[in-house]
Image (cartoon, rainbow, N blue to C red):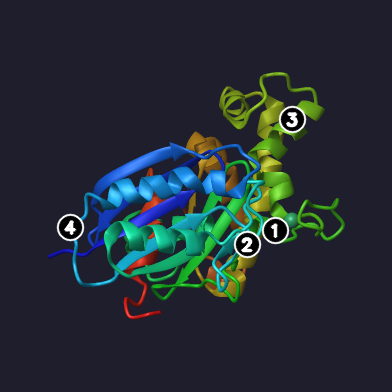
Amino acid sequence: MPEVVLAIDVGGTKMALALVDDEGTVLADDVRPTPAEPDPLRVVAPLLVGIAEILAQLPAGPEPLRVGISSAGPLDGPSGTVSPVNIGAWRGFPLVEHVQRAAGEASGRRAVVGLANDGHCFTLGEHWLGAGRDVGSMVGMVLSTGVGAGAVLEDTLFSGATGNAVHLGHISVNAWGARCVCGGHGCVEMYARGPAMVAAAQQRGWTGGDDARALTADARAGDPIPLAVIDEGMRALAAGIATTATELDVTTFVLGGGVSRAGEVIFGPLRRHVADFAALPYVRDLEVRPAVLENAGLLGAAALALRLDPDAP
Ligand SMILES: [Zn+2]
């Protein structure tokens, strides 16, 4: 019988849950809006109700239930706490503890819970069932309102000491750049994230809209200002990609996220700049592939669960 795990994907706007088997088939799923509440317990409440409801569909069994959580970062893996930038009520919030208790009570089984940031889970998902399923090592990247990332190296998630490894969006690509929200200077995200490119275009007189969708549409139509800011943003991202490839000795990169769905208008300049930076022989074949999954984060949370040791305390 295939094993079934519980996958959870917590973001600033929605919280998704699914029962997923060990072949990646989604057997049941549920999505709830993330409450915009100052009380941390009120924010987690609908997730705990969702866990009880979805686990009611799972037959009881003697073996432990494995649960994987994808959460917006930053987070602290060893303590199981999260402090997502886009969920203000949660600062050092013990998400693993809450999920473990709810899943244990609802299933009548011992719950073993793993936590990883959303960039890591995206990467696990694309590696398991998506654009990176034919390679042992890859870096996944999510380009939207921020730049998330993660790495699977030789089929193992490289989480780092605290669960935040390969934070590509906050690699500095301009040592003399302005100060970033993270406290550093000249980070990839300051140039490449959707809202940054939109703001740069508006400063140069572009009036075509206020989001990345409008920006990429105008670039596709040949508007020189959006074309120029996207080119600059993708040069920054390319520098981050080449740095990461050079550091990790990995040549498969998978790019997903809302901004990447604009397609060639993003991938064209990105690949051109990557070729300009990735000069050492061992990274010269660097390839940036488009992501293929719609729900890579949730499937990655399932992959995380399937990698947990069921005998872990
Ligand atoms: Zn930064």
Tell me whether circle 2 and circle 3 mark residues in contact (CB < 8 Å).
no
Secondary structure beneath dot 4 equals: loop
Crowd rating for badge 3 (residues with CA inside 10 Å; few <14, some 14–19, many 20+):
many
Q: Quadrant of ligand 1?
A: bottom right
Q: Which residue is mark 3?
A: 201
- Give how far across and how far down residue 7 sits, in percent: 36, 55
Screen quadrant of the C terminus:
bottom left
Secondary structure beneath dot 3 equals: helix
166 left or right of 3? right
Label 4 to label 2: alpha-carbon separation: 39 Å
* Marked residue nearer the N-terminal end (3 or 4): 4
* Marked residue nearer the N-terminal end (4 or 2): 4
Label 2 to label 3: alpha-carbon separation: 26 Å
Label 1 to label 2: alpha-carbon separation: 6 Å
In this rendering, which labeled residue sits more in front, label 2 or label 3? 2
Q: Which residue is mark 2?
A: 167
Label 1 to label 4: alpha-carbon separation: 44 Å
Q: Amino acid at mark 2?
A: His
Tell me whether circle 1 and circle 2 mark residues in contact (CB < 8 Å).
yes
Crowd rating for badge 1 (residues with CA inside 10 Å; few <14, some 14–19, many 20+):
many
Label 3 to label 1: alpha-carbon separation: 22 Å
